[in-house]
Image: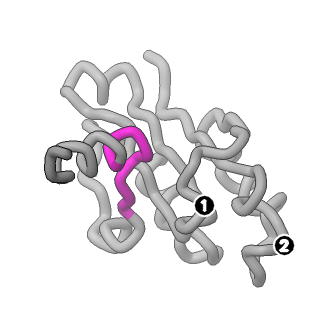
Amino acid sequence: MVPCRIVVCRDCCCGSPKVTGLDHAAQTARLREEAPVRVSACLDVCDQANVIVVQPSTGGRAAGARPVWLGLVNNPDATEDVTAWVRAGGPGVAPRPEILDLHLITPPRRRLSESRRLAPPM
């Protein structure tokens, strides 16, 4: 079974000096202790830096889970909340800790499609 995977944005805003008070390399290393990590270019939600996406394991996908987008993961405690959830199985396998609800964000494609649905016709 393929485990959860983690995507971390490390481009123009995420992982940069713009997000102060966080050791970005240490955060990435800590996440890698729990799951495979892919470092991504900009995920287009710069206003939510640092962005982390937790992708479900094969078991989680089989249970219907989708990737979970988390934003403003800007301190070691938030990173530990993410790693604890991933260690427990992540999306579709383990319930998401309520504390991570504070970090939930809408992926950019959904944001765009939602705004198009809500926009009045011209």
Decide: marks 1, 2 in contact (CB < 8 A)?
no
Q: Is residue 70 left or right of residue 6?
A: left
Q: Residues within 10 Å of mark 1 (few under 14, many from 20)?
A: some
Q: Find numbered disc 1 in the image and state the secondary structure of the residue it sits on.
A: helix
Q: CA distance from mark 1 to mark 2?
A: 13 Å
Q: Which residue lies at the image location 48% right of the left edge and 28% below the top edge?
A: 3
Question: Residue beneath label 1, please?
Answer: 46
In the rendered image, the residue lying farthest to the front is: 122
Answer yes or no: is residue 60 visible: yes
User: Is 35 placed above or below 111 here?
Assistant: above
Residue 69 place in picture, x, y as percent: 43, 50
Nearer to us in this view, 9 or 112: 112
For badge 2, the amino acid type reads: Pro
Q: Is residue 13 magenta?
A: no
Q: Which residue lies at the image location 39% right of the left edge and 33% below the top edge?
A: 56
The magenta stretch is 104-111
Residue 111 place in picture, x, y as percent: 34, 49
Q: Is residue 16 left or right of residue 78?
A: right
Q: Is residue 26 left or right of residue 59?
A: right
Q: Which residue lies at the image location 76% right of the left edge and 83% below the top edge?
A: 21
Question: Residue beneath label 2, please?
Answer: 17
Q: Which residue lies at the image location 45% right of the left edge and 35% below the top edge?
A: 55
User: Is 74 placed above or below 113 here?
Assistant: below
Q: Is residue 109 magenta?
A: yes
